Image (cartoon, grey):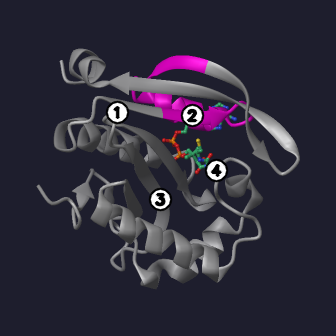
């Protein structure tokens, strides 16, 4: 099946491809240390070239099947502006993926990312038929962990000094779901 142009929907959200038209919104929202401090590959300051690079790699990833990056858009916004991103980085050999996400600060704490993650988990296991997904967050970012817990992901490990952000080595907490766990815990 070709998933290149796939669009996913939840009660409040549309998840679809990133577009070059999203560039100003992406730059505006990503220009926030509270975002860049918590997302491993998101630079600060954030320039137009960074947004273009992200959009290009999202398009390329859909073609090769190596990544599925979605823009998050609010259904209630008639212009469907970009408010955040969510994506799966696929490891084809092991049939697994790493989940990552961020949403712009004005939209925090109203359950939007938990809603998006729920849909992406379903997409990963039902459509892509992956065997495992993992997601991780920095110790200093418990709200991201909350999104994983609310989606019944299972704590797998605390990994010491796993990433270098600036001059600091940061611990991560990793959560997982396997296809079997998805069927037993979520689909039951
Ligand atoms: C982390 C992030 C994705 C959460 O998105 P969101 O749409 O606000 O998430 P939700 O509203 O679905 O859930 C957040 C939960 O965290 C809780 N929370 C917020 N701040 C918290 C804190 N300091 N400690 C513990 N829980 C916290 C909220 O109360 C909410 O839980 P609840 O629904 O039980 O009340 C968003 O804040 C973000 O993009 N942050 C910057 C980038 C980032 O961290 N990305 C993830 C990288 S792993």
Please provide the residue range marked out in magenta.
135-157
Provide the residue designation for mark 4.
Answer: 39
Q: Position of residue 106 (x, y in %)?
A: 60, 60
Q: At x 45% / y 40%, what residue is drawn?
A: 98
- Disc 4 residue: CB within 8 Å of ligand 1: yes
The quadrant in which residue 103 appears is: bottom right
Of helix, strand and loop, which one carries label 1? loop
Q: Which image quadrant: the N terminus?
A: bottom left
Residue at image mark 3: 85
Report if the CB atoms under discs 3 and 2 are less than 8 Å apart. Answer: no
Q: Residue at x 52, y 18 (%)?
A: 155
Whether label 1 touches label 3, CB < 8 Å: no
Work out whether 178 lies above or below 6. above
CA separation in Å, label 1 and label 3: 24 Å
Query: Can you tell which quarter of the image residue 141 is in?
Result: top right
Q: Residue at x 55, y 53 (%)?
A: 102
Instruction: Evaluate whether residue 15 shows in this view.
Output: no
Relative to 6, residue 80 above or below: below
Mark 2 lies within 8 Å of ligand 1 (Cβ measured): yes
On screen, residue 174 versus residue 88, left or right, reads right
Q: Nearer the viewer, residue 164 or 36?
A: 164
Residues packed near mark 3 inside 10 Å, few (<14), some (14 to 19) or many (20 plus): many
Q: Which residue is mark 2?
A: 136
Q: Residue at point 58% right, 37% down? A: 144
Q: CA distance from mark 3 to mark 2?
A: 16 Å
- Give me the disc on residue 94: 1
Circle 4 SS class: loop
Q: Earlier in the sequence, mark 4 or mark 3?
A: 4
């Amino acid at each position: 099946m070709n998933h290149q142009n796939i669009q996913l929907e939840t009660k409040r959200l549309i998840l679809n491809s990133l577009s070059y038209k999203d560039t100003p919104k992406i730059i505006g929202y990503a220009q926030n240390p509270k975002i860049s401090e918590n997302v491993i590959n998101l630079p600060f300051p954030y320039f137009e070239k960074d947004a273009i690079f992200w959009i290009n790699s999202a398009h390329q990833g859909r073609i090769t099947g190596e990544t599925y990056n979605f823009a998050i858009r609010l259904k209630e916004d008639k212009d469907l502006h970009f408010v955040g991103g969510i994506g799966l980085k696929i490891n084809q050999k092991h049939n697994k993926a790493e989940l990552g996400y961020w949403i712009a600060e004005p939209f925090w704490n109203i359950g939007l990312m938990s809603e998006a993650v729920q849909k992406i988990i379903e997409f990963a296991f039902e459509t892509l038929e992956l065997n495992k997904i993992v997601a991780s967050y920095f110790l200093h970012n418990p709200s991201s962990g909350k999104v994983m817990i609310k989606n019944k992901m299972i704590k797998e490990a605390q990994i010491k000094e796993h990433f270098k952000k600036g001059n600091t080595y940061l611990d991560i907490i990793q959560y997982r779901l396997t296809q079997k766990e998805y069927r037993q815990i979520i689909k039951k």
